[in-house]
Image (cartoon, rainbow, N blue to C red):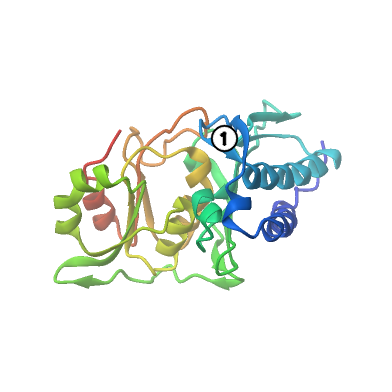
């Protein structure tokens, strides 16, 4: 095994360049709506832009493996792929090549490559998080115990939440099926002054990390690939993340086979606990 640590950031950035090119090559909504005819391991119909993004990421992972690095990878489309993983020192790469693919399909701005690296099997074990939002071209990076940044500028861990009339000024809502919003409406109204639905969980988490949103909730269970990188970015930026369907706050497993837990994030522990009480689909 290569004694030099893998260049996860370099690999992620190289994948971003490829994904950006593939998106530019499919500029119209008609081109971006083309499906491969298959379903990914996460259960969703695979778009051609999803497949191209995943191929870009896996080319970079294969290059790291060729350099002697050993790990396993989990992605939304392929599920688990073994790159000579060492069971004694497990390294797991958790990838969503195109978070917010429906946004990308429709030409809406927020869609991102999300990549996390974990030395273990739960969210608490994530040590590196990377999200690149192709709309505003923002790169979000976090390393455990080393802080988080956006486009190379460190995020302020002391950035406070904002309130209007005692409620969070801006709350992000993901998995925003109108039926689930309806069922959660009273709790959302009690806790939030205004709602924002970005349509990409990783990107919404990054907005909490930068204190652009005061908090965010998913109204159903989320897959590990959607949240693994973003949740570390929030925590390293001074925020709080809770996986409400798990016994431990950060105990959600890094497993793409099925959605694992709803997730909430906020700038303060008190707000995160309050958001955890919002009704949601399990």
Quadrant in the rendering for residue 28: bottom right
The percent coordinates of residue 114 (x first, y second) are 58, 51
Write down the residue under mark 1: 120
Q: Secondary structure at mark 1?
A: loop
Q: Nearer the viewer, residue 108 or 127?
A: 108
Quadrant in the rendering for residue 239: bottom left
At x 73% / y 47%, what residue is drawn? 56
At x 54% / y 71%, what residue is drawn? 154
Quadrant in the rendering for residue 71: top right
The percent coordinates of residue 163 (x first, y second) are 22, 70
Vertical comparison of 179 with 103: above or below: above
The percent coordinates of residue 19 (x first, y second) are 69, 54
Classed neighbour count for the residue bearing mark 1: other residues with Cα under 10 Å, few (<14), some (14–19), many (≥20): some
Q: Is residue 85 visible?
A: no
At x 14% / y 71%, what residue is drawn? 165
Quarter that holds the C terminus: top left
The percent coordinates of residue 195 (x first, y second) are 28, 62
Q: Nearer the viewer, residue 264 or 86?
A: 264
């Amino acid at each position: 095994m290569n004694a030099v640590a893998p260049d996860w950031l370099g690999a992620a950035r190289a994948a971003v360049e490829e994904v950006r090119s593939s998106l530019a090559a499919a500029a119209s909504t008609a081109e971006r709506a083309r499906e491969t005819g298959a379903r990914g391991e996460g259960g969703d119909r695979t778009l051609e832009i999803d497949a191209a993004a995943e191929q870009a990421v896996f080319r970079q992972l294969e290059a790291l493996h060729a350099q002697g690095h050993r790990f396993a990878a989990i992605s939304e489309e392929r599920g688990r792929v073994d790159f000579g993983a060492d069971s004694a020192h497990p390294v797991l790469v958790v990838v969503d090549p195109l978070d917010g693919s429906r946004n990308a399909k429709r030409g809406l701005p927020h869609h991102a490559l999300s990549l996390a690296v974990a030395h273990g099997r739960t969210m608490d074990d994530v040590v590196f998080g990377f999200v690149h939002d192709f709309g505003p071209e923002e790169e979000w990076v976090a390393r455990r115990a080393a802080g988080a940044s956006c486009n190379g500028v460190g995020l302020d861990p002391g950035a406070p939440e904002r309130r209007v009339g005692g409620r969070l000024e801006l709350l992000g809502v993901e998995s925003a099926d109108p039926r689930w919003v309806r069922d959660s409406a009273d709790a959302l109204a009690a806790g939030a002054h205004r709602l924002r639905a970005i349509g990409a969980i990783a990107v919404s988490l990054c907005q909490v990390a930068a204190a652009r949103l005061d908090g965010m909730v998913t109204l159903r269970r989320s897959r590990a690939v959607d949240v693994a990188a973003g949740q570390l970015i929030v925590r390293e930026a001074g925020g709080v993340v809770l996986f409400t369907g798990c016994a431990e706050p950060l105990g959600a497993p890094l497993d793409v086979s099925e959605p694992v837990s709803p997730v909430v994030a906020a700038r303060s522990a008190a707000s995160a606990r309050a958001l955890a009480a919002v009704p949601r689909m399990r």
